[in-house]
């Protein structure tokens, strides 16, 4: 299958830290992830392409103008603050974002960044933009007739809302791919198999009935992103009934994950989408440093096969999955589920 990645541009984003239990730790969303994932692509003999530059169009179809202005300009403004650090970490978080929008770079960082895992460095906007270009390019080839394509997005995207970064995510690549597919398909489903709930994706489509969002993840009652991902969140207004969360107990393995996935896919089939986006996190792996679920390497192959069996045009978008020896193997196992390339 065609794979889209721009290793050079995407690697320029190299966040230093994130806050864990009150302690600043090295940020696990490293450029090295890209190398490991590319080794998985190479193992499958897939067809690697540099994405084309789609400009702001596909990104602006999902994110707000004020947020894109912030992301693209804030570092330049931050640099002018005497003694400011090389990366932007917000030191204020408004509890109600309906408050007035500030002019200050510090105030805007608080407005648009929900947690302490999303530092903005000099090259963050550029890397995030090319990560989004991977998603748009994969969606484009699928609209043009490829049955499946893989966007090696990094930084990831599914924790990012319309105007709010969070959880290592700055632009919601899965949402960008889904919106791109809407050019041709009346109904699109996003199936999120990342360890963490896809809260940004849910938020973007929560009031819409044209994009069905399914997420299978570790129960957020005691796990990031805490405030979203519960079973009672089913959508609102026109979107009521078009969002499905399948929270799993911590430590759930391959069998339990597959049961949750199959239950969720029954609802996706009812929705009858014309195309799907897979938000592919590999951090449900038993050896992932986040340690939330215990899916095995062969489990990712099972997940891939189950999703391929939908028989629908599919854009696979990389989300989480952190450094461990098997990261590339897990990607290879998942993509092998789509090996035939035909419905
Ligand atoms: Zn994750």
Image (cartoon, grey):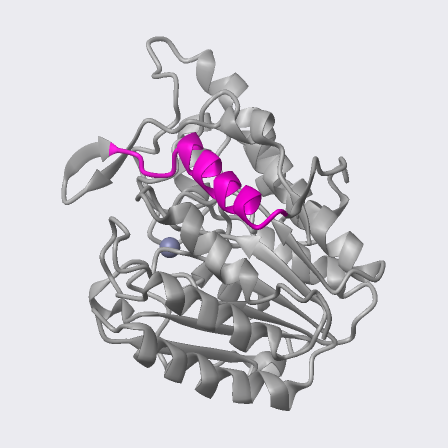
**Is 21 rendered above or below residue 196?**
above
Q: Is residue 196 visible?
A: no
Q: Is residue 88 visible?
A: yes
> Of 156 and 301, which appears nearest the observer?
301
Asked where in the image residue 275 lies, by quadrant, the reply is bottom right
> Of 134 and 230, which appears nearest the observer?
134
Point out the residue furthest to the top here.
82
Residue at 76% across / 37% down in the picture?
A: 52
Q: Which residues are magenta?
A: 26-45
Residue at 28% across / 63% down in the picture?
A: 226
Q: For this view, does 224 lie left or right of residue 172?
A: left
Asked where in the image residue 142 lies, by quadrant, the reply is bottom right
**Is 190 rendered above or below residue 73?**
below
Residue at 54% across / 89% down in the picture?
A: 266
Q: Position of residue 342 (x, y in %)?
A: 73, 70
Majority secondary structure of magenta residues:
helix
Q: Would residue 189 be counted in the magenta stretch?
A: no
**Quarter of the image where ligand 1 sits:** bottom left
Q: Would residue 37 be counted in the magenta stretch?
A: yes
């Amino acid at each position: 299958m065609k794979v889209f990645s721009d290793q050079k541009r995407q690697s320029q984003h190299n966040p230093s830290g994130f806050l864990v239990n009150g302690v600043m730790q090295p940020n696990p969303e490293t450029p090295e992830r890209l190398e490991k994932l590319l080794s998985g692509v190479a193992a499958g003999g897939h067809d690697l392409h540099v994405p084309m530059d789609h400009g702001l169009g596909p990104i602006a179809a999902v994110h707000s103008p004020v947020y894109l202005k912030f992301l693209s300009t804030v570092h330049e403004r931050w640099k002018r603050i005497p003694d400011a650090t090389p990366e932007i970490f917000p030191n204020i978080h408004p509890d109600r974002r309906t408050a007035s929008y500030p002019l200050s770079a510090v105030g805007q960082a608080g407005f648009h960044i929900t947690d302490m895992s999303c530092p903005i460095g000099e090259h963050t906007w550029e890397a995030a933009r090319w990560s989004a270009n991977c998603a748009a390019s994969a969606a484009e080839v699928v609209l043009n007739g490829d049955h499946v394509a893989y966007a090696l997005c990094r930084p990831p995207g599914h924790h990012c809302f319309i105007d709010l970064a969070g959880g290592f995510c700055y632009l919601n690549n899965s949402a960008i791919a889904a919106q791109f597919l809407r050019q041709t398909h009346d109904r699109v489903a996003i199936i999120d198999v990342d360890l963490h709930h896809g809260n940004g994706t849910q938020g973007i489509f929560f009031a819409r009935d044209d994009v069905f969002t399914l997420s299978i993840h570790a129960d957020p009652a005691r796990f990031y992103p805490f405030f979203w991902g519960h079973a009672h969140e089913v959508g609102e207004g026109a979107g009521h009934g078009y969002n499905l969360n399948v929270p799993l107990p911590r430590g759930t393995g391959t069998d339990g994950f597959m049961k949750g996935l199959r239950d969720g896919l029954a609802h996706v089939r009812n929705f009858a989408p014309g195309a799907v986006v897979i938000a592919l996190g590999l951090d449900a792996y038993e050896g992932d440093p986040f340690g939330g679920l215990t899916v095995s390497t062969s489990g990712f192959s099972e997940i891939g096969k189950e999703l391929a069996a939908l028989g629908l045009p599919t854009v696979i978008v990389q989300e989480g999955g952190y450094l461990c020896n098997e990261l590339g193997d897990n990607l290879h196992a998942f993509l092998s589920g789509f090996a035939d390339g035909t419905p």
